[in-house]
Image (cartoon, grey):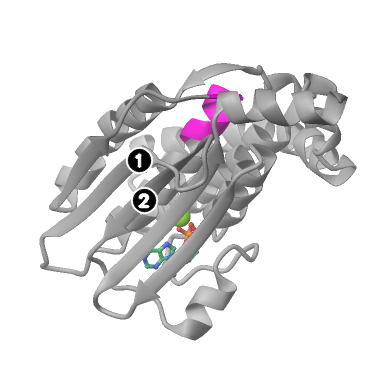
Amino acid sequence: QLDETVYMDKLSTVGQMAAAFAHEIRNPITTVRGFIQYINSNTKDESLKQYAPLILDELDRTNKIITNYLTVAKPTNITLEYVDVNKVLKDSVDLLRPFGSYRNVTIDLELEGDHFIYSDEHHLKQAIMNIIKNGIEATEEGQGGLVQIKKVHGEVKGTIEIYFIDNGIGMSEKQLEKIGLPYYTTKSKGTGLGSMITTRLIHEMKGTIDYTSKVHIGTTVTVVLPTLRNMKEKSRKEDE
Ligand code: ADP
Ligand code: MG
């Protein structure tokens, strides 16, 4: 049976320690950020004015790394509930639409039927948003981008398949092998943690994630998740 105890057991001790450290590190960062902003808006020092945005950017990047860890590792954050997959997909797309428009990327969403999974809504949302964000960021400069998202009944009964198809820069075989490794990034402001976290979250949901890609053609991310009915069947079989 997939209850909260089993779910939390999956979270490593290392992850929980990371969460504790992350929490402690965050407070001083917030303080430092506030001071830099204050000094920046009151100074006449030109070099300080020039470097302050860089300092703020780096602090924000640090915060982002910490946030990614916290959301995944913090055990108290987990609430298992019936999650409406369509709702989470719609919400994620709505949240990322402004970022998409800013990068001249259209996001398309196609939903076949209603599906529920038993999971933590925020985890599913974070996983989905990481994938869509990568799709948007993959758009090549000066090109209009498209991220197509399709959710369909899975080929295997009791599963759903979600496809995230972009027409961006794509990845070579070598790059495909590295995706999901911690800190692997090809972006100047990337954290290289998004895909690692996404993979971990999808696996926690007993799902799978696969990447296929062609350089300059685009990438397809396929997520397969067991739906609620399948989970019930599974646990019933295990009980027998
Ligand atoms: P980040 O986005 O911070 O770089 P991720 O773990 O999300 O970290 O992604 C790691 C790397 O995988 C990216 O820097 C990029 O090179 C590659 N990648 C991920 N998704 C895509 C995609 N949809 N198209 C092309 N490359 C991608
Ligand atoms: Mg990313």
Q: Do the residues labelled 2 and 1 touch (CB within 8 Å)?
A: yes
Residue type, mark 2 in image: Tyr
Residue type, mark 1 in image: Val
- Range of magenta residues: 117-125
For image coordinates 76% across by 36% down, the residue present is: 19
Image quadrant occupied by the N terminus: top right
Snapshot quadrant of residue 117: top right
Q: In this view, does 213 lie to the left or right of 226?
A: left
Give the Cα distance between marks 2 and 1: 8 Å
* In-front residue for pair 59/124: 124
* In-front residue for pair 72/7: 7
Q: Is residue 101 left or right of residue 152?
A: left
Q: Is residue 29 above or below residue 203?
A: above
Asked if one can make out residue 48 in the rendered structure from this viewpoint, the answer is no
Q: Is mark 1 on a helix, strand or loop?
A: strand
Snapshot quadrant of residue 152: top left
Q: What element carries label 2?
A: strand
For image coordinates 58% across by 74% down, the residue present is: 178
Q: In this view, does 112 lie to the left or right of 154?
A: left
x and y, in percent, of residue 35 in the image: 52, 34
Image quadrant occupied by the C terminus: top right
For image coordinates 18% across by 55% down, the residue present is: 146
Image quadrant, ligand 1: bottom left
x and y, in percent, of residue 97 in the image: 22, 37
Q: How many labels does the image show?
A: 2
Q: Which residue carries the number 2 mark? A: 163
For image coordinates 58% across by 24% down, the residue present is: 229
124 in the magenta segment: yes
Q: Which residue carries the number 1 mark? A: 152
x and y, in percent, of residue 177 in the image: 57, 76
At label 2, counting other C-alpha atoms closer than 10 Å, the crowd grade (few under 14, some 14-19, many 20 or more) is many
123 in the magenta segment: yes
